[in-house]
Image (cartoon, grey):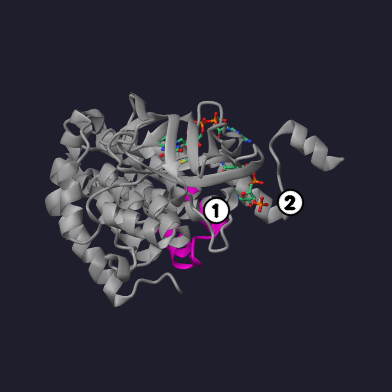
Amino acid sequence: MPFDLTEEQKALEARVRRLATERIAPRAAAIDRTEAYPWENVAVLRETGLLGYTIPKEYGGAGGNFLDAAVIVEELARACGVTGRIAVETNMGAISAVMCHGTEDQKRLAAGLVLAGDKPAICITEPAAGSAANEMTTRADRHGGRWVINGRKHWITGGGTSRLYLVFARAFAEDGRELGIAGFLARAGETGLVVGRREPTMGLRGIPETEILFENLEITDAMALRHADGRLVGFADLMNAYNSQRVGAAAVALGIAAGAFDLALDFARERKQFGRPIGEFQGLQWKLADMAIGLEAARLMVRRAAALAAPFPDPLLAAEAKVLAAETAIRVTNEALQIFGARGYSRDFPLERMARDARMFTIGGGTAEILRTVIASRLLGWKLPQRRAKARADAS
Ligand code: FAD
Ligand code: COA
């Protein structure tokens, strides 16, 4: 199978598992409690070469592939979901879009920032354009050879801590003609890029989710993503690159669930009731078996989607992997919590944090409902427009 791990990948997996156990896990509870961005963990990832692992060697990275990244992310997320997410966004998603579609200068800028510890942010969602992302109203107007960006995004992971923002905006030419949705790079600290309200999230509390307001943000044309022939990189290509982030999110969900499963397995061996380890009760044995089946299936789907990337994961495989991993993670973390009994419900133990962290993955990055629509569209071989007016127009 193309998604079997090579000897190097098995060694990478073992190395990251050790690192995560020794240096990442001990800080996970404090990150959740304080809601502080884990800069110490970023330093660990940087020092051990795990930031920008997929960045090509000529730009200073390790030249790894998405399967390497999925392995790294799963192992880090076993210990700390927040750190797993940082590994996603420094190896997949926005950074991969720039390394594929960017100019030489854009690649050097993005790679340099990531290798120095930045987790780039991706700005798609708006208050009135969530699942219907392509109804966004943030606009980039060409003006005197520059772009002026105005609009409001929300739920931007890393708002305020990220140095680089990949902004999806509706582009307009100097003469007012609409050019479609395109991708622009903006840097933190520029006048006109304003970090707004931080969301009080249920889980994954160590990364800020914020509004990002664009108030006449001016960027040079050199910050617009363009194909070699000069065309702006449009929505479909940006979403195609985004499939890597969906696989990354699936790997985080898988990792969190695998971490919870390991704890539940140990607990089932050690905790005694009725004079026997609770793992001797068939009611729990079958729970553990179902949890293991779900995890193994999710791992195969995540690795398949990552391994078959060309250059990005296929939209169908990415959607299937994310739905399965996210729903498995919710189930497995809740079952693990149940196996811990009252301890599972206590903030003195990590299970309640893991269950809260896992809950996100059927929402962020494309909801499970939207991803099922993506899957159905491929199965049926039909476009499935969700807007009433568009559906009517297409039908006539
Ligand atoms: P809505 O689109 O309003 O959906 C509400 C409900 O309706 C959902 O259950 C949805 O599945 C359902 N629904 C909507 N349309 C359909 C349909 N056609 N068929 C069936 N069901 C439908 N966005 C970014 O741009 N950048 C980020 O970094 C980012 N990070 C995030 C991090 C977190 C922790 C979270 C929770 C979200 C993040 N998001 C980010 C936003 C995320 O992508 C959106 O929340 C998601 O796309 C859904 O949009 P919405 O919340 O507006 O829900
Ligand atoms: N991979 C590759 N291409 C994709 C894609 C993906 N994941 N999602 C959309 N596209 C392409 C389509 O193929 C289509 O290309 P075409 O114009 O060349 O035919 C184009 O983008 C528009 O997509 P379509 O599915 O026709 O649009 P829609 O109006 O039905 O909108 C989406 C649906 C794309 C907005 C919706 O499926 C979606 O993904 N919503 C979630 C947004 C999200 O993930 N946000 C995360 C923010 S972090």
Mark 2 closeness class: few <14, some 14–19, many ≥20 residues within 10 Å: few
Q: Name the residue under label 1.
A: 233
The mark found on residue 365 in the picture is: none
Residue 202 drawn above or below residue 25 = above
Secondary structure mostly seen in the magenta stretch: helix
**Disc number lying in front (2 or 1):** 1
Magenta-colored stretch includes residue 297 = yes
Q: Which of 138 and 50 is in front in this view?
A: 138
Q: Type of residue at label 1?
A: Val
Residue 363 location (% of width, % of height): 47, 36
- Residue 286 can be seen, yes or no: no
**The quadrant where residue 180 appears:** top right
Residue 75 location (% of width, % of height): 27, 55
Q: Type of residue at label 2?
A: Trp
Numbered range of the magenta stretch: 296-322
Label 2 C-beta lies within 8 Å of the nearest ligand 2 atom: no
Q: Mark 2 points at which residue?
A: 382
Residue 58 location (% of width, % of height): 31, 70
Magenta-colored stretch includes residue 36 = no
Q: Which of 258 and 79 is in front in this view?
A: 79
Which secondary structure, mark 2? loop
Q: Which of 77 and 338 is in front in this view?
A: 77
Label 1 C-beta lies within 8 Å of the nearest ligand 2 atom: no
**Whole-Å distance between the Cαs marked 2 and 1?**
25 Å
- Residue 344 can be seen, yes or no: yes
Residue 141 location (% of width, % of height): 55, 37
Label 2 or label 1, whichever comes before in sequence order: 1
Q: Is residue 136 left or right of residue 340?
A: right
